[in-house]
Amino acid sequence: MTWVAADKVRYLNPEIVLLFKARKRRRKDDRDFEVAWPLLAREKQDWLREMIRRSDSHHPWLVDSNQTK
């Protein structure tokens, strides 16, 4: 769930943060998704896409994430 960066600070994995943000769907969460999605490794994108699909198969982020495949 976390990783330690070169600065020795522990951070939450972005794909997990985005999964929690997917439930609220605030404007700032949508923006975070738009910015973070292309920076995620392919396997993390796949994981996030599947987790969102399990909770809401019609979630708009699924459409957005499939366009960047």
Image (cartoon, rainbow, N blue to C red):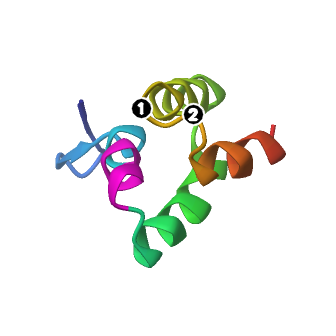
Residue 19 drawn in magenta: yes
Q: In the rendered image of this protein, does residue 14 appear above or below residue 26? A: above
Give the secondary structure at mark 2.
Answer: loop
Q: Residues within 10 Å of mark 1 (few under 14, many from 20)?
A: few
- In the rendered image, the quadrant that contains the C terminus is top right
54, 21: nearer the viewer: 54
Q: Which residue is disc 1 drawn over?
A: 55
The residue under label 1 is which amino acid type? Answer: Ser
Specify whether 19 is left or right of 58. Answer: left
Q: Residue at x 24, y 30 (%)?
A: 1
Q: Quadrant of residue 2?
A: top left
- Boundaries of the magenta span: 18-24
Decide whether the magenta segment is chiefly helix, strand or loop: helix
Q: Are marks 1 and 2 in contact (CB under 8 Å)?
A: no
Q: Residue at x 42, y 63 (%)?
A: 25
Q: Which residue is disc 2 drawn over?
A: 57
Give the secondary structure at mark 1.
Answer: helix
Residue 32 x, y percent position in the rendering: 48, 65
Could you tell me how far apart the alpha carbons at marks 1 and 2 are, in whole angstroms? 7 Å
